[in-house]
Amino acid sequence: MAIHRRRESARPGARMLLESSDPVSLPPAEINIDGVSVEREEFREYVDELLELLSAGVEAIPAPVVMSNSIFVIDGAARSFWVRIWHLDAERTQIDRLHLSSCPPRVPGLRLPDFSR
């Protein structure tokens, strides 16, 4: 697992993009609400559930079928949240930016194949 600072912003306090090809256990985190964005406006109604999960700590699983190590799936009670997360610290306790790409209804027991391997 890696957290990368963008080359042009390698100064203290710069955002670090979470990247990993393995599941990542995220500790409880403080979230900058102003840094939350959604891909489509109809996803906004589900943001509170996602923020609650991240505030309590959760496991983030690399998104299947996506050729990116920076998109993760976080399973909620009724939805699966596809997100990108930028932290301010290496301990991953301060989320500065969060982008919600998708949030399909969760289907318990459904496992998508991992084509990235």
Image (cartoon, grey):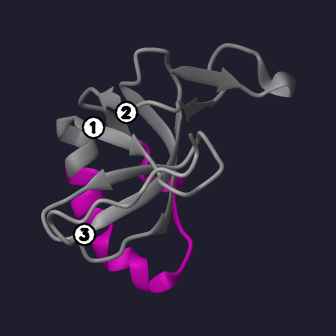
Residue at 32%, 51% in the rendered image: 74
Residue at 16%, 71% in the rendered image: 78
Q: Which residue is mark 3?
A: 79
Which disc is residue 59 wearing? 1
Residue type at mark 3: give it: Arg
Query: Are discs 1 and 2 less than 8 Å apart at CB?
Result: yes
Q: Which residue is mark 2?
A: 23
Work out whether residue 17 or residue 114 is closer to the camera in this orientation and state it: 114
How far apart marks 1 and 2 lie (CA) works out to 7 Å
Nearer to us of marks 1 and 2 is: 2
What span is in magenta? 32-52
Judge left or right: residue 102 versus residue 54: right
Q: Give the mark nearest the N terminus, 1 or 2.
A: 2
Residue 69 lies, with reference to residue 22, above or below; the image says below
Work out whether residue 103 or residue 33 is closer to the camera in this orientation and state it: 103
Nearer to us of marks 3 and 2 is: 2
Q: Residue 80's x, y, as percent?
A: 30, 64
Residue 45, magenta (yes or no): yes
Count the marks: 3
